[in-house]
Image: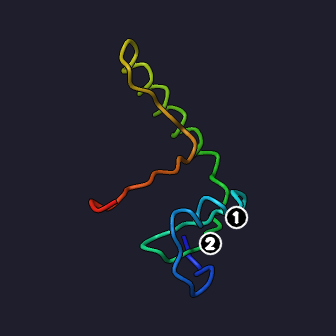
Amino acid sequence: MAFIRRDSHFHTYGDYLSWSRTSGDELIDGVAYVKEPPAPSLSHQVIVMELGRQLQNSLEGTSWEVFIAPFDVRLPKSTE
């Protein structure tokens, strides 16, 4: 997957939150990238759904949840 720099500016997490969710932007150490991944293949989708189903079944009765779609995660530095 190719990452293309969005621009040459330093960006904050606040900047990231204000961007459009349709462009697939990523923010890594203040550098903004635009990623445009290809659509997943049919076999990929079948495998992901099966893994998700098995995980969900194994976690039944616990407080854990399974998410299939991409999910944004913010990993703050220890000083934040």
The residue under the point 56% across, 84% down is 9
User: Total number of numbered labels?
Assistant: 2
Q: Which mark is residue 23?
A: 1
Badge 1 or badge 2: first in the primary sequence = 1
The residue under the point 45% across, 23% down is 56
Depth check, front residue: 57 or 76: 76
The relative height of residue 55 versus residue 3 in the rendered view (above or below) is above
Characterize the local packing of mark 2: few (<14), some (14-19) or many (20 or more) Cα atoms within 10 angstroms: some
Check disc 2 and report the residue beneath it: 34
Q: Position of residue 38 (x, y in %)?
A: 65, 62
Depth check, front residue: 13 or 59: 13
What is the three-letter code of the residue carrying label 2? Val
Depth check, front residue: 60 or 51: 60
Q: Position of residue 28 (x, y in %)?
A: 45, 70
The residue under the point 62% across, 79% down is 6
Helix, strand or loop under label 1 = loop
Q: Position of residue 58 (x, y in %)?
A: 36, 20
Residue located farthest toward the left when viewing the structure as drawn: 78
Residue 31 located left or right of residue 63:
right
The relative height of residue 22 versus residue 68 in the rendered view (above or below) is below
Residue located farthest toward the bottom when viewing the structure as drawn: 8
Residue 56 located left or right of residue 1:
left
Q: Which corner quadrant of the image does residue 33 belong to?
A: bottom right
What is the three-letter code of the residue carrying label 1? Ser
